[in-house]
Structure formats: structure tokens, C-alpha cells
């Protein structure tokens, strides 16, 4: 690979790459991110390569394994260029038809297209699918176009031109001012202005400074940073090098959790390619600026996503937070100035340098500029990664992009910001999504997790779940976090078991306040958000659990009972055969009965009973009807169909 010594040489290389590519030549791009790997994309890839050879199209069709396309609900996804025909949920058996019909005959295969659920019409082009149509994919958009292991693909789209511009046309101070002017706020959770952090690190005393990519991302259900690092690692590297130049750093780290093997592999490949081209190492672009970067694999602890804990882990010690009376920008890794931003923040920097701060600042709201990638998961039809402008409403994300709630269920809440975020109810669905508005609602932006919940979700159980997660992930270093979370979890567990008592809600609020005010790091200071937000918006559910020993959503097992309605039982024996606890008695021509002492409340009988019968009933907070006397259990067969 040639070493690039000037912006002119970079442009010459880019033109050379493009000259060898025919824009009209068919190109198949296949989503090959971790989510699609799990759905069989590797088998699909092998089938594509085999079929291209088999049908005599070698050299006539390009094939590219790309990063995540975002629409994870419908993976694996294929997009055929230049027409951008989008096929969803592809299996290896579909490939021969795709090659013979779409590639050779230019015919669209309707059964593989997206079907609009409102109009029942087939959608051919990716950009017209509602999931994509309502997004603004600035950072994430290239994921579906480039092979993450090919630097040529990145260069063909203008990659490293921002770095060339920064090093050849701008001073470090000018780069810093451009980022400050853009009002880019850190996408990792806190939303601190990136430019101010960079400036503080630049002005800190000391010649040795570090820049760090935080790719720890431990929030349940969140995988935005993983997908960007897997699918477009050079964008992150380019942003990191630009940041290092502005700050005056010559050494950087990419901190990736061990559970992200594909991200580790792809970023390692990108680093080697960048070195070979001269984008890393000594005298980058002939500017005299030197920079190297190393990958540090994290052990997977959630608390290591906190800045000081992450830096402690880089030093080779246990990832525990430390008091930040002095900011890590002044005293971080090895007590030297260290600037930490997450993956998405660094990947945004090249866009700002190329297109300008004014362009970036016109996107979003007054206090939150640009776009944000969210992991949209839970009880929503279209799960996946979505990139939207700041200021979009929750309703638009969940209904226009997410396609609404499955099974005509009613929306109940959306939890934003990971386990440290809060739950936002239906009455606030028209709230604009940005750092400040989410905070006002008792939640937070976090790294971008967004979990949608429907009417079958118990909010007490949600708070208990997240506190259980945080209790396990707390490093235990400070008492307010360690004991505060543990005691809140104990109270929530008792409430969900029907053992709650008067005063528990008030005690939870008091413990939440103490934990928030006195904890050492953000894990403890935000741990109370799920508790306080669910109490604030769904206090009636807490009271039902405590006063009536009832779970309105029928989730908390200890408060649920199952029984069989004798008037509807058909003696079909389906529930009896499937009960794992052997708690159902009966037989042919006998009404079935559930033994409440043996019942484990797994719900198998409820799910197994045919809907046309509806004999198994689920109740909460009500007494179970008395069992049927033995002598009254015989019933007449109604029909052979009901046997």
C-alpha cells in the first residue's frame, strides 16, 4: 500500500480507486454486523460467492460484506446497487434466484421486498422503507456501503480528507475552535461539550497527553458504538487523529469491551491499514505531527464505562472509579491529561471538519446539535439502530420509524439512557429528544439505548430489573452506591413478591436521593433514575402491589394465580400434557384442575390452552376459585375436534 505524504497524494489515490470502479456495475452489499452474523449472514455470503461463480458472473458482479445496515429486525439484508433494491431476511436458498432474476434479468423479487403494513404495498428501494425514510443517517449511513476491512472503500467516499484538511489547512487552535463552534456534545451519556473538554485537556500542563475512544458500551440493549466500530472503523480513527492534533496528543487508546470480537478485529485491521498509508505514525501528511494508537480490551465490567474507571483499567488495574476533584482531562491515564469521548462522538468529528461547524449546528435543537444514533429495541415492530436529528419526538421514533407496538398492544413507556435512565410515559411521547428535555423528564440520553414497553410490562419489575443489573455491576468501592442500590433492590423485590408495606415508596425515594447525592461516580448517582421515574409516572402500580397485592400487568409471579374455568374446560388434555410441574389433574371426560401448591406459575398452561376455549384463567390480587369436587369433574365430549 502506498504511503500518503500530502493531501494532493490522497486525492490522487482516491481518484485512482474511483477510476477502477464502474458505478453502473452491479454490486451486492450484505449486512455482516454481529446481529446479522447471528441470523446467518455468513452462510448467505458463502452462497453469494458460490452462486456468482456458478452462474458465470465472476468479475461482472461485485460483492461487499458491509457493517450493520441498522434494520436488525429484518436481517440479513441485501442491497443491490446501483438501483438500491433492498431484500430483507435473506436465506442461502434465496441467492440463486436473486442472482438469476435480479442481477441477470433485472427483475425484482417481490416476496423478498419490504411490505408496508399500512398500505400492504411492496417497497423496492431502501430509502423508501419507512424505517430508513424517516432517519438522517450522517454518521451511520456509510455502514451499509463500505467493507469495513477495506480502506479503499473508505477513501472512495472521501475518507481521511478531513484529516488532510485539518493538518494542512488548519492550526490545532482552529480545529479546536471549529469543534467548539459546532457545539458537539459527547454522545457517551453525559452530553458534555466535546470542544470544552478538548480545550481543557489541551491547556492542561504536561507534554504527554492521551486521547481515548470509549467503546465499552455496557447498557443492556445498546449496540450503537459496536456497530459503528465494526462497520466504519476508519471514521472513528480519523476523528481520533484530528482530536489528537487539536489537543496536542501523540498517543491514543481505543478501549473496547472483550465481548465485541468483530469490532476488535475490524479496528485492528483499520489501524494497520492506516499505518501503511501514513495516516498513523510519524510525520502524518508531511505535517510533522506524530500519532500512534493502541487497542485495549476491557474485561466487560459496566462500571468501566465511567471515565476514571476506564482509565484505571488502561493502566492495568481493576476498573474502579476514583474521585474526580481534578478532571480526567487534567489528570487521567497515569496522572496525565487525557481526553475521553465515545465512538459516535469521534466519528462525528470528520463531518464537522469537512462540512463546517455552521452546517452541523443547524441540525438539532438549541442545546443539542447534530444527530444521534439510538438502539431501538423492546416492544416495537421495527427494532434496530436509528440515526435521527436531535429534537425529533419520541412518538416519531417509535411509530414512524419503529412501526408502533406489535400485536395492537398499547404503548406504556419508553426507557432511555440504559439502566441509569428513566421511564417516560405515553403522555410525554411528543417530547423532543435531546439532552436537556430528557433530563427534565427524569431520564437521560445516555449512550442511546431506547427500550419500548407495552401494556404487558410491569413498571415495578422494570425498576427491579435495572437495580438488579446495577447491583451486580457496582464496583462496591463507595458505600452509598453499594448499599443504597442493594437496599433499594431488596425493597423492590419484596414489593414484587407481595411483601411490600406502607412507607416503602417513601423509603425508596429517600434512598434514591441519598444514593444520588453521595455516590462516587455516575453509576451510583444515576442508579435511582429507573426507581424515581417509575414512582413518579406509575405510582398507582406500586400502590397496587403494596396495598392490593396485585400486579396490574400480570408479570410478578408471586402475585399471579392460574385456574381452569370448569364451564369452558373441554378436557382436551393439552394443558395437562404440557405442564412441566405436573400440577394439573384430570383426564378424558374430566374437567382439569390446577393444584395451587404444585403450580410454579410458569404460565405454560395459559399459553397452551387453545384461544377458542379460553379455559385457563390468569388472575392477580383475587382469590382462586375453589377446586371442583371429584364427583363433579366428569363432562360430556362436545365434539371430536375438541378431543
Image: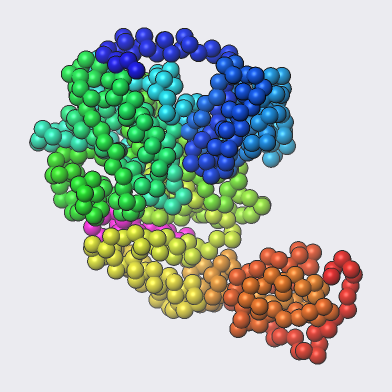
Question: Does residue 491 appear in the picture of this structure?
Answer: yes
Q: Is residue 185 left or right of residue 607?
A: left
Magenta stretch: helix, strand or loop mostly: helix
Q: Identify the residue at image location x=83%, y=84%.
A: 634
Position in image of residue 174 (x %, y %): 22, 22
Q: Identify the residue at image location x=49%, y=30%.
A: 66
Question: Does residue 552 appear in the picture of this structure?
Answer: no
Q: Quadrant of the C terminus?
A: bottom right
State yes or no: residue 522 in magenta. yes
Vertical position of residue 271 compared to residue 356: above or below: below
Instruction: Name the foreground residue: 560 vs 78.
Output: 78
Q: Is residue 451 left or right of residue 529?
A: right
Q: Quadrant of the N terminus?
A: top left
Position in image of residue 360 (x %, y %): 37, 26
Vertical position of residue 51 compared to residue 200: above or below: above
State yes or no: residue 610 in magenta. no
Q: Quadrant of residue 554?
A: bottom right
Instruction: Name the foreground residue: 477 vs 29.
Output: 29
Q: Is residue 474 left or right of residue 549?
A: left
**Labels in figure, total:** 0
Q: Identify the residue at image location x=35%, y=46%.
A: 257
Vertical position of residue 280 compared to residue 228: above or below: above
Q: Identify the residue at image location x=63%, y=69%.
A: 603
Position in image of residue 258 (x %, y %): 36, 47
Position in image of residue 499 (x %, y %): 47, 79
Q: How is the image coloured?
A: rainbow
Task: Give the extent of the magenta segment.
Answer: 518-537
Q: Quadrant of residue 619?
A: bottom right
Amino acid at each position: 500500500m502506498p504511503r500518503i505524504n500530502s493531501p494532493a497524494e490522497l486525492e490522487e489515490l482516491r481518484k485512482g480507486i474511483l477510476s477502477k470502479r464502474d458505478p453502473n456495475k452491479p454490486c451486492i452489499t450484505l449486512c455482516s454486523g454481529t446481529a446479522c452474523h447471528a441470523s446467518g449472514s455468513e452462510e448467505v455470503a458463502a452462497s453469494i460467492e458460490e452462486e456468482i461463480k456458478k452462474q458465470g458472473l465472476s468479475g461482472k458482479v461485485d460483492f461487499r460484506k458491509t457493517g450493520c445496515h441498522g434494520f436488525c429486525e429484518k436481517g440479513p439484508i441485501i442491497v443491490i446497487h446501483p438501483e438500491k433494491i433492498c431484500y430483507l431476511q435473506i436465506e442461502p436458498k434465496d441467492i440463486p434466484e436473486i442472482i438469476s432474476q435480479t442481477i441477470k434479468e433485472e427483475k425484482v423479487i417481490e416476496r423478498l421486498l419490504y411490505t408496508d403494513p399500512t398500505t400492504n404495498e411492496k417497497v423496492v428501494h431502501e430509502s423508501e422503507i419507512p424505517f430508513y425514510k424517516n432517519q438522517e443517517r450522517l454518521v451511520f449511513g456509510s455502514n451499509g456501503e463500505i467493507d469495513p476491512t477495506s480502506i479503499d472503500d473508505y477513501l472512495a467516499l472521501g475518507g481521511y480528507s478531513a484529516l488532510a484538511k485539518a493538518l494542512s489547512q488548519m492550526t490545532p487552535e482552529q480545529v479546536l475552535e471549529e469543534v467548539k463552534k459546532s457545539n458537539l456534545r459527547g454522545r457517551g451519556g453525559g452530553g458534555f461539550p466535546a470542544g470544552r473538554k478538548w480545550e481543557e485537556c489541551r491547556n492542561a500542563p504536561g507534554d504527554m497527553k492521551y486521547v481515548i475512544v470509549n467503546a465499552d458500551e455496557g447498557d443492556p440493549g445498546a449496540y450503537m458504538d459496536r456497530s459503528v466500530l465494526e462497520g466504519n472503523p476508519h471514521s472513528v480513527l480519523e476523528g481520533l487523529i484530528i482530536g489528537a492534533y487539536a489537543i496536542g496528543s501523540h498517543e491514543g487508546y481505543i478501549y473496547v469491551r472483550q465481548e465485541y470480537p468483530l469490532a476488535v478485529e475490524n479496528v485492528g485491521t483499520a489501524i494497520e491499514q492506516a499505518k501503511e498509508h501514513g495516516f498513523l505514525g510519524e510525520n502524518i501528511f508531511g505535517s510533522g505531527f506524530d500519532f500512534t494508537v493502541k487497542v485495549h480490551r476491557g474485561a466487560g465490567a459496566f462500571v468501566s464505562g465511567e471515565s476514571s474507571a476506564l482509565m484505571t483499567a488502561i493502566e492495568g488495574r481493576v476498573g474502579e472509579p476514583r474521585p474526580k476533584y481534578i478532571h480526567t482531562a487534567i489528570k487521567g491515564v497515569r496522572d496525565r491529561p487525557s481526553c475521553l469521548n465515545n465512538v459516535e462522538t469521534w466519528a462525528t468529528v470528520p463531518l464537522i471538519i469537512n462540512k463546517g461547524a455552521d452546517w452541523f449546528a443547524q441540525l438539532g435543537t438549541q442545546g443539542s446539535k447534530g444527530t444521534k444514533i439510538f438502539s431501538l429495541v423492546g416492544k416495537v415492530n421495527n427494532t434496530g439502530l436509528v440515526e435521527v436529528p436531535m429534537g425529533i419526538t419520541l412518538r416519531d421514533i417509535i411509530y414512524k420509524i419503529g412501526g408502533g407496538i406489535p400485536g395492537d398492544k398499547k404503548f406504556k413507556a419508553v426507557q432511555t439512557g440504559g439502566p441509569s435512565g428513566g421511564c417516560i410515559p405515553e403522555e410525554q411521547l411528543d417530547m423532543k429528544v435531546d439532552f436537556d428535555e430528557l433530563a427534565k423528564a427524569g431520564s437521560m440520553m445516555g449512550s442511546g439505548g431506547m427500550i419500548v414497553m407495552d401494556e404487558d410490562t410491569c413498571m415495578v419489575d422494570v425498576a427491579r430489573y435495572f437495580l438488579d443489573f446495577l447491583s451486580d455491576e457496582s464496583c462496591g468501592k463507595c458505600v452509598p452506591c453499594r448499599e443504597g442500590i442493594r437496599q433499594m433492590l431488596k425493597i423492590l423485590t419484596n414489593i414484587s413478591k407481595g411483601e411490600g408495606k406502607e412507607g416503602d415508596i417513601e423509603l425508596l425515594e429517600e434512598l434514591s436521593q441519598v444514593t444520588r447525592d453521595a455516590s462516587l461516580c455516575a453509576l451510583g448517582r444515576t442508579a435511582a433514575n429507573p426507581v424515581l421515574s417509575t414512582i413518579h409516572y406509575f405510582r398507582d402500580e406500586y400502590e397496587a402491589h403494596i396495598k392490593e397485592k396485585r400486579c396490574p400487568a400480570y408479570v410478578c409471579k408471586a402475585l399471579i394465580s392460574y385456574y381452569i374455568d370448569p364451564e369452558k374446560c373441554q378436557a382436551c388434555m393439552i394443558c395437562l400434557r404440557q405442564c412441566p410441574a405436573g400440577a394439573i389433574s384430570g383426564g378424558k371426560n374430566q374437567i382439569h384442575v390446577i393444584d395451587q401448591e404444585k403450580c410454579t406459575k410458569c404460565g405454560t398452561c395459559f399459553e397452551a390452552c387453545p384461544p377458542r376455549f379460553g379455559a385457563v384463567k390468569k388472575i392477580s390480587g383475587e382469590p382462586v376459585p375453589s377446586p371442583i369436587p371429584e364427583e363433579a369433574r366428569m363432562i360430556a365430549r362436545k365434539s371430536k375436534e375438541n378431543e
